[in-house]
Amino acid sequence: MPNVMLRHNAAGQLVFYVTKRDHEETVTALEHAGPGAWGGEMQLADGSRFYLEPFAQPPKLPLTVRVKRL
């Protein structure tokens, strides 16, 4: 369960950053992205998938969270 930082880049895309590996990727799909829930399964540009426990509302970014690799 890595700690990751989520933020928006200059183009407004959601970016996933793993500090221990100095690895950054764009999030291409997010299971829940609406006002009722935000999080769930995330697909990254490199094809890897992670799970983020959903939030009730979209959080303020940047945000550091723990995710599970799928």
Image (cartoon, helix red, strand yellow):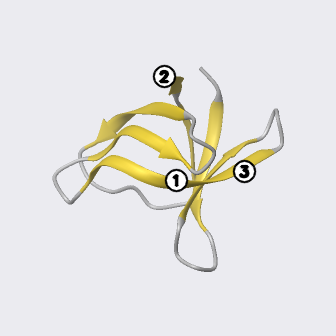
Label number found at residue 10 = none
Residue name at image x 54 percent, y 23 percent:
69
Q: Quadrant of the N terminus?
A: top right
Distance between the alpha carbons at the discs numbered 2 and 1: 15 Å
- Identify the mark nearer the N-term, 3 or 2: 3
- Identify the mark nearer the N-term, 2 or 1: 1
Residue name at image x 31 percent, y 38 percent:
54
Q: Are marks 3 and 2 in contact (CB under 8 Å)?
A: no
Distance between the alpha carbons at the discs numbered 3 and 2: 17 Å
21 lies above or below 39: above
Which residue type carries mark 3? Answer: Glu
Q: Residues within 10 Å of mark 1 (few under 14, many from 20)?
A: many
**Residue indicated by mark 1:** 27
**Residue indicated by mark 2:** 70
**Residue indicated by mark 3:** 24
In the picture, residue 33 is in which quadrant? bottom left
What element does badge 2 sit on? loop
Residue name at image x 40 percent, y 51 percent:
29
Left or right: 24, with 21 as reference point: left
Residue extending furthest toward the front: 47
Which residue type carries mark 2? Answer: Leu
Residue name at image x 78 percent, y 40 percent:
19
* Residue 23 spot, x, y in % from top left: 77, 44
Q: How crowded is mark 2: few (under 14 residues within 10 Å), some or many (20 or more)?
A: few
Left or right: 51, with 18 as reference point: left
